[in-house]
């Protein structure tokens, strides 16, 4: 076939490859896509001086006791939360099993706002005690799927103490357990500059050298709770720069509800996960993290389910709505601060995935050519359908047998579809 250019089509394609080699490599490096694996559906933040061996089981027992006291039956829970009774009936047995078996998915010993500044001697002692508690639970096979600490941040007033606490914690855990477990999580709070993230990378490198750890072993989460972590003075998106500055070490972004709201001038009565200022910050976080493999987490509700039955039910109703809202907006993780919040964390989450299950499975089956249907989905939509099924399987809301029966593909196949890079298949 004649060409209207001096070069043939094959030559043009080859030159395009050469022109775009650097851009292709940058895309692969900066946007590796979903890394797969199980993202916890919540993080439990507890003052460090309260964390001891067997902590998760204690919270599970308290959560089950709250269920029995305030909503012992399906109808009771449906009335308490405003949730559909059939959805509650479907999910509640799974919730009870979860609270007895694995009540906390991600436990964070808090050395920051929830802990305070009790003095160096006390914080040294608590840093060592927390590491030993985690090591004990690891040895006894009862460690939570993820665990770690929230250190004091890189602000001038707390950075020396934060470095010391992290160092003591890592050294003790390494000594007691013999290695650093893969599910160890470090949270960096109060970030106000890209340079602080760069400093955290440098600090991790120094600790790896000092403790004899492989390069890149230490990763950390960024807690987004200041306006400076959303927008830089020149108008650019700070959190996107921070992910890049992390050099592959940033594992998640957590929204800090109340610090961020206060910094934006929102009065306490209106500070909420559902405030427009919160939605803006989280939308920026979501776009910045898209395609990077960095997880997203929403924050917490500070209205705890405590007091009279009416007060507990009102707090549960609020929590159920906020969790559902976050899930619908693509934030699959949140914070819990009290054991009485655990029943609704799992109930609302399980109900969400079980509601999504049947239509997602049917559409995915049709996409895979095994059934007819009147919706023609694109590869990206098929991936989104697989993601909701994969997340439901990972957290225990769905069972593999029912997923296989509904869409004709096993859990491994679901994971492959959920984590593939759509549009970039070779």
Image (cartoon, helix red, strand yellow):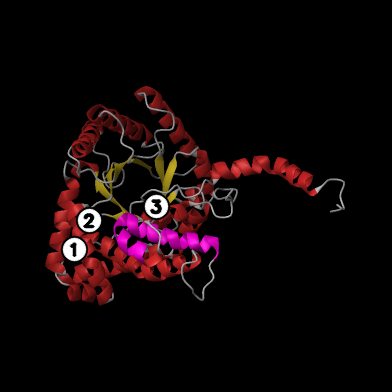
Tell me, yes or no, whether the two marked residues, 1 and 2, touch with CB atoms within 8 Å. Answer: yes
Horizontal side of 148 relative to 51 (left or right) equals right
The nearer-to-camera label among 2 and 3 is 3
Mark 2, secondary structure of its residue: loop
Label 1: few (<14), some (14–19) or many (≥20) C-alpha neighbours in 10 Å: some
Is 398 contained in the magenta span?
A: yes
Residue under label 3, please give it. Answer: 412
Label 2: few (<14), some (14–19) or many (≥20) C-alpha neighbours in 10 Å: some
Residue drawn at (87%, 53%) of the image: 4
Q: Quadrant of the N terminus?
A: bottom right
The nearer-to-camera label among 1 and 2 is 2
Instruction: Work out how far the residue at label 1 is from the one at label 3, CA to CA, in angstroms.
Output: 42 Å
Tell me, yes or no, whether the two marked residues, 1 and 3, touch with CB atoms within 8 Å. Answer: no
Residue under label 1, please give it. Answer: 306
Q: For residue 239, say whether it is visible.
A: yes
Which numbered tag is attached to residue 338?
A: 2
Instruction: Work out how far the residue at label 1 is from the one at label 2, CA to CA, in angstroms.
Output: 9 Å
Mark 3, secondary structure of its residue: helix
Q: For residue 398, say whether it is visible.
A: no
Spot occupied by residue 322 in the image (x, y as percentages of width and height): 34, 65
Q: Which residues are magenta?
A: 378-405
Up-down: is 374 above or below 294?
below
Q: Nearer the viewer, residue 303 or 62?
A: 62
- Which callout, 1 or 2, points at the residue further toward the start of the chain? 1
- Which callout, 2 or 3, points at the residue further toward the start of the chain? 2
Spot occupied by residue 207 in the image (x, y as percentages of width and height): 38, 27
Residue drawn at (14%, 55%) of the image: 61
């Amino acid at each position: 076939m004649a060409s209207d250019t001096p070069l043939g089509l094959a030559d043009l394609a080859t030159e395009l490859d050469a022109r775009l080699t650097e851009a292709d490599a940058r895309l692969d490096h900066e946007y590796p896509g979903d890394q797969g694996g199980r993202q916890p559906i919540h993080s439990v933040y507890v003052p460090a001086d309260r964390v001891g061996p067997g902590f998760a089981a204690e919270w599970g027992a308290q959560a089950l006791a709250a269920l029995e006291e305030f909503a012992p039956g399906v109808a009771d829970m449906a009335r308490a939360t405003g949730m559909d009774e059939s959805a509650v009936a479907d999910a509640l047995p799974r919730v009870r099993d979860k609270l007895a078996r694995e009540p906390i998915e991600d436990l964070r010993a808090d050395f920051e706002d929830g802990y305070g500044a009790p003095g160096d001697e006390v914080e040294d002692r608590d840093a060592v005690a927390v590491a030993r508690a985690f090591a004990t639970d690891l040895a006894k096979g009862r460690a939570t799927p993820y665990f770690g600490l929230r250190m004091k941040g890189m602000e001038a007033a707390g950075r020396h103490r934060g470095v010391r606490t992290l160092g003591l914690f890592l050294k003790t855990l390494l000594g007691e357990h013999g290695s650093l477990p893969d599910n160890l999580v470090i949270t960096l709070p109060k970030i106000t500059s890209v340079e602080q993230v760069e400093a955290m990378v440098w600090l991790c490198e120094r600790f790896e050298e000092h403790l004899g750890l492989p390069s890149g072993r230490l990763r950390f989460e960024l807690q987004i709770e200041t306006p400076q972590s959303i927008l830089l003075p020149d108008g650019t998106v700070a959190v996107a720069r921070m992910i890049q500055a992390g050099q592959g070490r940033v594992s998640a972004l957590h929204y800090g509800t109340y610090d961020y709201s206060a910094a934006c001038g929102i009065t306490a009565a209106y500070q909420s996960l559902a405030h427009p200022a919160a939605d803006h910050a989280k939308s920026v976080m979501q776009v910045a993290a898209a395609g990077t493999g960095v997880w997203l987490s929403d924050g917490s509700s500070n209205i705890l389910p405590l007091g009279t039955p009416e007060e507990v039910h009102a707090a549960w109703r609020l929590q159920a709505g906020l969790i559902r809202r976050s899930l619908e907006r693509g934030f699959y993780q949140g914070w819990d601060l009290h054991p009485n919040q655990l029943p609704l964390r799992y109930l609302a989450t399980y109900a969400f995935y079980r509601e999504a299950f049947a239509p997602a499975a049917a559409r995915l089956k049709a996409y895979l050519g095994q059934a007819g249907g009147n919706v023609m989905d694109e590869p990206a939509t098929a991936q989104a359908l697989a993601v909701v099924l994969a997340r439901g399987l990972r957290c225990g809301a769905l069972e593999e047998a029912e997923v296989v029966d509904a869409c004709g593909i096993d859990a491994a196949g679901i994971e492959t579809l959920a984590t593939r890079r759509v549009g970039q298949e070779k």
